[in-house]
Image (tube, rainbow, N blue to C red):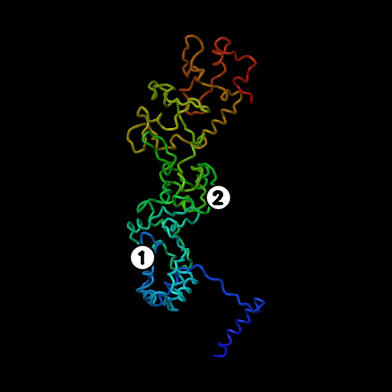
Amino acid sequence: MSRVVALAPVFTAVLVLAWTGDGATQPPPPQTMATGFDHRGHAVAMARAKHNALRCTSCHRAGDPGTIAGHKTCFGNCHGRRPRRARAGHPYRIDKKRLRMCTACHAPAAVAQLRKRGTKPPRVRFPLPRRRRDRIALSGPFPVGPGFSHARHRARVKAACESCHRTITHTTANRLPRPKKAACAGCHDGATAFAMTEAVCRRCHVAPGPRLQRHTTKLVRFDHAAHSRRGASGNCRSCHTLTSNGTPLPAARNHAPCSNSGCHKRDFASVRPKICGACHVAMQPWRPLHRDRGWPLETEFGARFSHKAHLGGAHPRIRSGCAGCHQVASGKHELRLPHDHSTCTSGSCHARTSAAETGARPALSECRGCHRAGLVRKRQLRRYTARWSVRSRFRHAPHRTRPGKPARPLPCRRCHAGIDNTTGLSDIPAPSKQRCISCHDGKVGFKITGHDCARCHGSDH
């Protein structure tokens, strides 16, 4: 056995010659970096020695986990006394058994020089930045980074570090794994702490990460029909609420409708979300992501309104006339109702909620009492495709008064005869040509029996 051991250097030299092709030995490159702390190795060693597991705060400071207390962390109760010199100028006395422990923080080449010559102790080469703001590494596309405070969480939760850093004792890498978003959901549920689905992204995500997120969200609006085909609830109040004046809000607060467990809950924990484009034009959580997509030009729903029930009879419910409801005019719409329910709530007509004892039925919270999906589209298709339609060219504003001096106002019923007996918006009769002749006679207005048909009907008819 001793002969085999004695011949080992010879075989080593032969191998070096065969590898290099000459007799010059190649010294190994000096190691300038430390090997790093082995959390897993310490956990296994403590278990084998039947000792209690090390607590994170035994080495790390609670308020700044990236900081350790120098040699006090390793020496003392764990690895004996710290290395010391016999006298000035003499090498350090480092036991070979503890040499591996030193190279966890110091470069091996520096430790070797320290054992030969008693120079100034080497700098710590463990891969941790010196400044605290740099130690909080920004990793991943959506890092938490400086937005997280260990001290604040320990003061409120008073839980062990392992409750969030569950995989620390299973890794041998220097760059330790960070908690996933699922680990935060146990506390950030909306009751113990703010929910992660709330519109407070910038409370945690305050800066972009080093790795740019190149995924762009698709600007696809919310589609009620598509959600209905997927089995979504048909109850409007499950997503929408009403303001004090009856205005329907886009959705409930803090993404609650979309973040439900049966809907898009996983999307809020993904780095490539798909639904942000329904309301936002970006998805980076460090940006002030307000609702930056405006109202759609056309609604998916239409209202079933009975003029007969509101205007007919000896005692009509609405006494203010047509102008009491039809007030808003824009480039594409004329004399439509406002977006909110202020027309229906004025004059104590309809109650805002179904629980109210006063007010006409249906209440504003009973959305299906008036609204149906697709009604607007059907009415528009019917009106614009009607033969000899004047809808694309007609404007109410110049027809509100009869030309001449003095200008006399024209009541709406002068042209829209029979509207008081209609039960639906599609039943409202368009004015007949005979109604127009009384004004368009060539004297008060241009004569409609001429050859300038496109002036009213457009060029597509």
Q: Nearer the observer, disc 1 or disc 2?
A: 1
At 50% from the left and 71% from the top, the residue drawn is 109
Picture quadrant where residue 62 is located: bottom left
Q: Is residue 427 above or below residue 12?
A: above
Dot 1 crowding, Cα within 10 Å, few <14, some 14–19, many 20+: few
Residue 461 or residue 48, whichever sits in front? 48
Q: Quadrant of the N terminus?
A: bottom right
- Viewer can see residue 1: no
Q: Position of residue 116 (x, y in %)?
A: 47, 76
At 50% from the left and 13% from the top, the residue drawn is 402
- For the residues labelled 1 and 2, the Cα–Cα distance comes to 38 Å
Q: Quadrant of the C terminus?
A: top right
Picture quadrant where residue 63 is located: bottom left
Q: Seen in the image, is 89 located left or right of residue 9? A: left
- Viewer can see residue 111: yes
Q: Which mark is residue 57?
A: 1
Q: Which mark is residue 214?
A: 2
